Image (cartoon, helix red, strand yellow):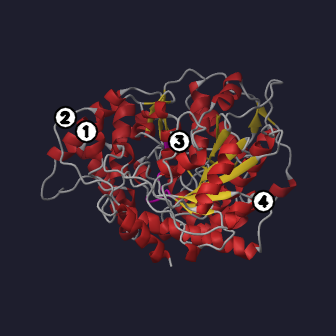
Amino acid sequence: MVWRGLRALQGALRGARTGRRFSTRPARAPATDYQDAIRTLNTLQTNASYLEQVKRERGDPQAQLEAMKDFLERSRLKVEDLDRLNIIHVTGTKGKGSACAFTECILRNYGLKTGFYSSPHLVQVRERIRINGQPISKELFSKYFWLVYNRLEKTKDPAHPSMPAYFRFLTIMAFHVFLQEKVDLAVVEVGIGGAYDCTNIIRSPVVCGISSLGIDHTSILGDTMEKIAWQKGGIFKPGVPAFTVAQPEQPLEVLRDRARERECPLYLCPELDTFKGDHQALKLGLAGAHQRSNAALALQLARTWLQRRGCQGLGELQDVPVDTELVGRPVPLAPTFQLTHAMIQGLRDTEWLGRTQVLPHGPVTWYLDGAHTTSSIQACVRWFRQAALNQDKPHDGSEVRVLLFNATGDRDTAALLKLLVPCHFDYAVFCPNFTEVSVTSNADQQNFNVTLENALTRCLENQRTWTQLLEEKGGQDPWLPTPLRAGGLLQPSSARGSLLLVPPALRPLNSPALVFPCLAQALRWVAQGRDPQLAAPAASGAHPHPVASSGAVLLREAAAVRVLVTGSLHLVGGVLRLLDPALSQ
């Protein structure tokens, strides 16, 4: 059934893009501007290829780390050089990026020059390497890219024939940037896992952190929380204090054992509410109740860094109130302390795009969260329902809710979508992460590992899953608009190849699920010309899809349209690029 719908889509796009990769590998050019640097970077293995490489090599982690050290030395750095960066090393399944962002912002509020290395990027690659909270400039990115790339290229020989993969290269480049730009400290987010991650060549961080654990990247890290905890605990170093947040009992015991094995003092972060802050209301720059544990972890990481580096102005330690739920836990509780103004301000000023982010654009409000695990989707649902509840309700009650979803990798999308059903969406829209169906796609977001055909097949499968979930729920959902009882397939609407695909065989008469071939078309349909950043959708042609045409009427006439974008950070990044063009500048 999926293939029936896919063949219809292929016919519509034949002669344009179908069956081909979104971009061809460009030849390496000597030019040194930003786009040339990004195109050359893209010729290295992309993340999917890197993951396959990790799977093959995971039986010999030392070989992976030795290979990374070799690449580092070929770029004219040694592992010992990284000690000068005063690194805060952070891993976890969910929230590690947010915890890093909180930590960096707190320390920047102390007047320190901060470096921050994270992944993935949302709009531009240079977001991964930040100084003082800002992505490095295009000029700086180009400068260090070519410096590292040329050194590695020149040191190729029979014994060292390869270049590092995409993520490994950017990690090495980030170390060069931070060292030469003389940052006071570097907050380094682990890519995947911990023990085998290429950032784990760091030998002497100042402090380590582990955010909430969950199930993700199971083909690499293992299929249980205990196996994943073992991998995450691989960043522990002898004598280096480490902190984690509340975890399930068994994974926490694994972390404890890993810490003992590595002679690392490990502490459990108390809840954020146990900290006291100079009679100021403690506000977080990132929305959602789940961000409170990330903020608590950040406070411990920042204070420990300041303490170990001999900085002044630390908050006084306090007695920790006993939490009966934590009694008997295998890891001791870290002390709380009086929060300083810099800590309070840092938590309040933290920004982290694409995570519990709200963009009000007139009558259309976009809710963006890159959640992609079951636990993070649960947190996303709680945040979205509360955020939508807090918005002003239209006087006539005409509100339309839309889900825009995609997921990548080996994630269980059925489990993720099931968690989203209670949000009572009027429409569910599925599309690939590509902003346009075009070979001229932005170089920052090129992916050589995904074809249009494969991406759309995944979307059709997600659409079928959503339909089945609604069927299991039983009957016509009272939240869904009546016009959704039609069926059919929308044909190409213009020479530009605009296409909306909803195969009748995959959708019962009450299904609200729609599939678009790219984000630009999906967003234009949702916004119906009511978002100033988006053009109105193209005319639907002689054979408009009933769901699309009736939905367009509802979307144009509704007093409020609320759109939740989730399932993938790459999806959120593509949406941000279209909704906020300044991010691409």
Secondary structure at badge 1 equals: helix
Please tell me which residue lies in front, 27 or 51.
27
Q: Are marks 1 and 2 in contact (CB under 8 Å)?
A: yes
The residue under label 4 is which amino acid type? Trp
- In the picture, the disc for residue 31 is 2
What whole-number distance in Å separates the C-alpha atoms at marks 3 and 2? Answer: 38 Å
Type of residue at label 2? Answer: Ala
From the image, give the main secondary structure of the stretch colored magenta: loop
In screen coordinates, is 48 left or right of 216?
Answer: left
Is 89 or 567 nearer to us in this picture? 567
- Sequence-earlier tag: 1 or 2: 2
Can residue 436 be seen in this snapshot?
A: yes
* Quadrant where the C terminus is found in the figure: top left
At label 3, the amino acid type is Ala
The residue sitting at 65% across, 40% down in the picture is: 364
Disc 3 and disc 1 in contact, CB within 8 angstroms: no
Disc 4 marks which residue? 479
Q: Nearer the viewer, mark 4 or mark 1?
A: 4
Q: Mark 4 and mark 1: span between their CA atoms? A: 49 Å
> Where residue 430 appears, x then y in whole percent?
55, 59
| C-beta proximity under 8 Å, tags 4 and 2 | no
Query: In this rendering, which labeled residue sits more in front, label 4 or label 2?
Result: 4
Query: Which residue is denoted by mark 1 in the rendering?
Result: 36
Seen as rendered, the residue at the extreme front is: 542
Instruction: Name which of mark 4 and mark 3 comes first in the sequence.
Output: 4
**Would you identify the image quadrant in which residue 45 lies?**
bottom left
Q: Which residues are magenta?
A: 188-196
Which residue position holds label 3? 536
Identify the element where label 3 is drawn: loop
